[in-house]
Image: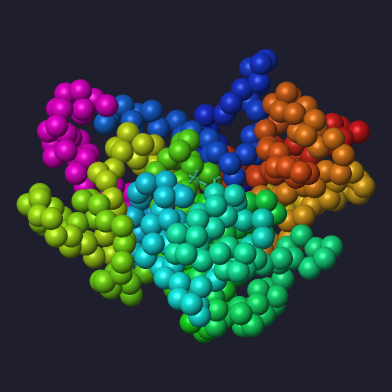
Amino acid sequence: MDASDPLAHFRSRFCFPKTKTGEECIYLCGHSLGLQPKTTAACINQDLQDWAELGVEGHFHGKNPWMPYHRLLTNQTAALVGAKPSEVVVMNSLTVNLHLMMVSFYRPTAQRHKILVERGAFPSDQYAVRSQIQFHGFDPAASLLELTPRTGESSMRDEDIEAIIDREGDSIALILLGGVNYATGQLFDLAAVTQAGHHRGCIVGFDLAHAAGNVPLCLHDWNPDFAVWCNYKYLNGGPGCVAGCFVPERHARAQLPRFAGWWGHDEATRFQMSPDFHPMPGAEGWQLSNPPILALAPLRASLEIFAEAGMDRLREKSVDLTGYMEFLLDQPASAKFSIITPHDPERRGAQLSIRISQNGRSVCDRLASQGVIGDWREPDTFRVAAVPLYNSFRDVYRFVQNLVSALS
Ligand SMILES: Cc1ncc(COP(=O)(O)O)c(C=O)c1O
């Protein structure tokens, strides 16, 4: 499979962490922090050099002038999430963008005040939604509605999600789902959820932290009201990299309430320094501050690689890699672990979540000491992702051998 893999050569464009003896690690942690492209340093250095040589003039006369710098990322970002360029912007960090979107799109009333989330959503999302509910004077005990798998199951069933939206729709102000759940790796049917939510008059938003760069997305066609994601996992933009945000064009010129900042103000009049805020049309109208150029630079390196590889080809390889890992893990048929990620490739991305019944943490630590990098999520889950840009089928094979040996 490696010999006939048309994407195999991309591996050599990434920096792999090394073991103490100097061998490349088996790195299966792209769901947490993607690897560094070898071109990243040059991108940052170019901007450092412009700053050194030009000072403030770098805003207009740098090799990549800082004033419109964030737009260097717009077309590739839009292509990755299936949006029009005017519908996306790279800004802030993920939780900040989630709050900004909720300021505009979570407008609870006495009748329609609930937020529907998946149980076990990433903690930052849980804190964000609870604090938004409280900010509006409501009580999370009454206003937070959680999707829960059936007893004995780890994933939500599509029909149960639709049923709860149908049943509770009148009181739901916002449906907020992770595109891929961070713990189980379940990929939700985002088109169906959006349709079901809109049918019942709900606003629908997605946290795509574990979906962007992992699975193909068609945000414009699926038509949610907003989406946010980070760029440091599958998108390899580096730790804490600036995040992404999608607002569909139907909301572009709406007079939506928002928390405003000068970088969201119409650029034609921004430097007139008037106190009246006139937002840019489109997602850019939610920007607050002038962007951190040195934190955007790594994303240029990464998105160029994505554009070359193409999301469709990456997904094709990803399905094979993850399927191969599942196949190998099924061989030992061990009672010591089970895969809690859905078996159906349509309902998952690259990640497999492996529930280890005993001593899982020490198994994970032992693997790490051997240069096999996944990550542990309490109480019992070992998460691994074979990332099609830089992982090989051989990585997957060696990982399973190491895991089985560590477990025994
Ligand atoms: C699903 C999800 N949401 C939110 C966050 C928080 O991201 P940030 O720290 O960039 O705000 C993470 C971080 O891993 C995440 O996985």
Q: Is residue 60 magenta?
A: yes
**Residue 395 position in % (x across, y down):** 69, 37
Which portion, as a residue range, is magenta? 48-76
**Residue 23 position in % (x across, y down):** 65, 21
Q: Is residue 332 above or below residue 86?
A: above
**Residue 3 position in % (x across, y down):** 65, 42
Give the quarter of the figure containing the C terminus: top right
Q: How many marks on residues?
A: 0
Q: Residue at x 16, y 38 (%)?
A: 59
Q: Residue at x 76, y 44 (%)?
A: 379
Residue in front for this viewpoint, 249 or 34 = 249
Q: Is residue 299 above or below residue 106?
A: above
Label the magenta part by its dominant secondary structure: helix
Residue 122 visible to an observer of this rendering: yes
Left or right: 233 in relation to 149 = left
**Residue 289 position in % (x across, y down):** 27, 46
Residue in front for this viewpoint, 155 or 324 = 155
Left or right: 53 in relation to 286 = left
Q: Residue at x 80, y 47 (%)?
A: 355
Instruction: Looking at this view, name the residue that lies furthest to the top.
Output: 21
Residue in front for this viewpoint, 119 or 178 = 119
Image quadrant of residue 255? bottom left
Image quadrant of residue 248? bottom left
Q: Residue at x 12, y 33 (%)?
A: 57
Instruction: Looking at this view, name the residue that lies furthest to the left.
Output: 272
